Image (cartoon, helix red, strand yellow):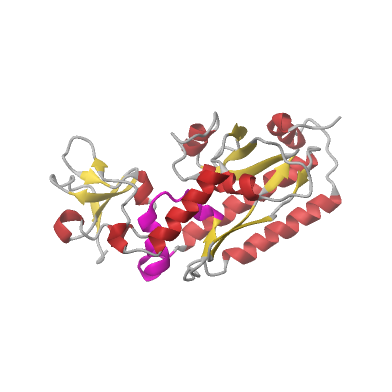
Amino acid sequence: MTKTIDTLVEDIYNVLDQTKEHDPHDTASQEAAMRIGTEFIKATELRDKPRERGKLWASDLGKKCLRYHWYNFNEPEYGEVLNGNTKFKFLYGNILEESVLWLAEEAGHMVRGQQHTVELPVGDWTVRGRIDAVIDGTLVDVKSTSSYGFKNYKDGIDATNDTFGYLWQLGFYHGFGEFDYGVDDVSGFVWIDKQNGHIAYTPVEVPSPDDITQRVLEIIEAVEGEEFDTPRAFGPEPYGKSGNQKLSVGCSYCAFKQRCWRDANNGKGLRTFLYSHGPVFFTEVNRQPAQTVLEITDEG
């Protein structure tokens, strides 16, 4: 009986169920081991190389802030360097994603097109990316996330909760990918809760090819323009009732936040305070945080 992606999660759990026998497929297991080994190698390579002008990655399309793209190509030296724990986080996320694709095959699902390249020429620029896979005819992107993120996405993702622009990347693959086999009109995400091992599949509606092309043109125009001609995508937001203003989530994860917000706090730049729930980046401090909250400075 032919499997469908609707039973993917249940079938994966059944493969791992200790009360049920399963005989692993040697070839698929060896291929998965090779891909995971490649992830180990990639994890030690430099990720902070200057961007080559004229080339965009599919993941760039999901980054809403045009000023981010300007810095990325014109002033990359101001970007925050990825530290060891961040690269390790990416590594085990990639391993989890490869593991789910292997389990999908073990569960009898048709997994094809892993790392298939998709390209789109736009003038003198080229957008390029590699898909995760096509499972049972459905183009999927596999994402590992925190339990909080999993709760946010497990019932569906659309423009209202797509904080990191995942839909744009998947839309690029779906709209411009050329495959030698049939691909459904609907694409989707496979979500992994990397803390608790939960998995979910959600079909989605992605931006149209016209919208994708327009996004590419906007990014190119911003990169080839001037820094302050490109607006920030996110403004500051209140922090409680203190009167203080902080970066939004979209800005706080940006590698160029210090450069972009150098005009914050009357030209002194961002002020960073370490709360129990993590660092908060203030653009305006009207009330000094409690003495128990450590301020992180260049001096430490």
137 or 9: nearer the viewer: 137
Question: Residue 28 at x, y = what percent?
Answer: 81, 50
Q: Is residue 67 magenta?
A: yes
Q: Is residue 191 left or right of residue 271?
A: right
Question: Residue 174 at x, y = what percent?
Answer: 63, 44
> Measuring 73% from the left and 37% from the top, which residue is drawn there?
16
Q: Is residue 160 left or right of residue 193?
A: left
Q: How many marks?
A: 0
Residue 89 appears in the rendering? no
> Measuring 72% from the left and 36% from the top, which residue is drawn there?
12
**Residue 159, relative to residue 251: is it above or below?**
above
131 or 223: nearer the viewer: 223
Q: Give the magenta part as a residue range.
A: 58-81
> Measuring 48% from the left and 58% from the top, which residue is drawn there?
85
Identify the image quadrant of the N terminus.
top right
> Measuring 54% from the left and 55% from the top, which residue is drawn there?
90
216 or 249: nearer the viewer: 216
Q: Is residue 184 magenta?
A: no
Q: Is residue 77 left or right of residue 142?
A: left
Q: Residue furthest front?
A: 123
Residue 137 quadrant = top right
Residue 202 appears in the rendering? yes
Question: Residue 81 at x, y = what percent?
Answer: 42, 65
Question: Residue 250 at x, y = what percent?
Answer: 38, 47
Q: Would you say the magenta stretch is mainly helix, strand or loop?
A: helix
Identify the image quadrant of the C terminus.
bottom left
